Amino acid sequence: MGRTGHGWEGVVLKLFRGRDFTFTVTGAEQVTEDYRRVRLADGGLLAAAGTHPTMWVRLWFEEGGKPHQRAYTLVDPDPETGTFALEFALHDGVASRWARSCAPGDTVEATLQGTGFTAPDPAPGHLLLVGDAASLPALNSLLGAFPATPATLWFETAHASDEALPVRLDPALHELRRVPREDAGAALAARVRAELPALLAAAPDPYVWIACDTATTRALAGFVRKELALPKERTHALGYWRP
């Protein structure tokens, strides 16, 4: 798919100064039966843009003669070698089909636009994170960005294999609370609503970061900001997928 084949979404991204790159697959591994890691050469991305926690790019795929773009977080970006990985929570979608079938030498087009990260000030005294397999790379990136900070992570699981996902925990600092996905995310929302207030009350300079399905993310963001009155600069919420 050429640079002109991105449709109206590509035109909009160009208007907002999106920068285009071509990534080359260098390898892939099946982390679990439902999760795949693809390693890539960056096509000059990291030298041009640098890196920041939770950094993401938009990948372009063509299916049925139409362009489709999906956003993915960079995993272990290395500016010196110009490499990184992307991780895919597999399902029946255009990006997952590409991830399952790609081979070394294959290329995929990408646009850098919209990513950013502002570190909370003062720095977090406790990270309170809500996510799932789709946002796992960003969760791991946050844990790596604040390596000495205690963290509590509510992690929604959809498959038995999610127990083996590579959550980068430090047992001395991090607590993982797994929540099986039930009722379209309602179980996760209920668990966080029940447990978050006490942790917030006890945490010095807390920082809440929420990234699960769009509806659950929206509900929890409203709860944190309106009912718990956490200042806007101490919370971040972004829906990572739609059921």
Image: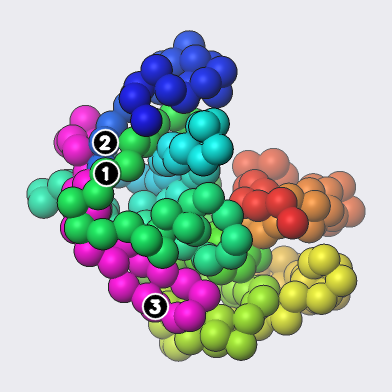
Question: Which label was assigned to residue 22?
Answer: 2
Q: Residue at 82% of width from left, 66% of height from top?
A: 184
**Residue 56 placement: quadrant:** top left
Disc 1 from disc 3: Cα separation: 21 Å
Q: Residue at 72% of width from left, 66% of height from top?
A: 200
Q: Is residue 122 above or below residue 168?
A: above
Question: Which label was assigned to residue 31?
Answer: 3
Type of amino acid at the residue the image marks with label 1: Thr
Residues packed near mark 1 inside 10 Å, few (<14), some (14 to 19) or many (20 plus): some
Q: Is residue 68 above or below residue 187?
A: above
Disc 2 from disc 3: Cα separation: 24 Å
The x and y percentages for residue 43 are: 19, 38
Between 176 and 186, the one nearer to me in the picture:
186
The x and y percentages for residue 235 are: 65, 49
| Marked residue nearer the N-terminal end (2 or 1) | 2
**Residue 29 placement: quadrant:** bottom left
Q: Are the residues at dot 2 and dot 1 in contact (C-beta closer than 8 Å)?
A: yes
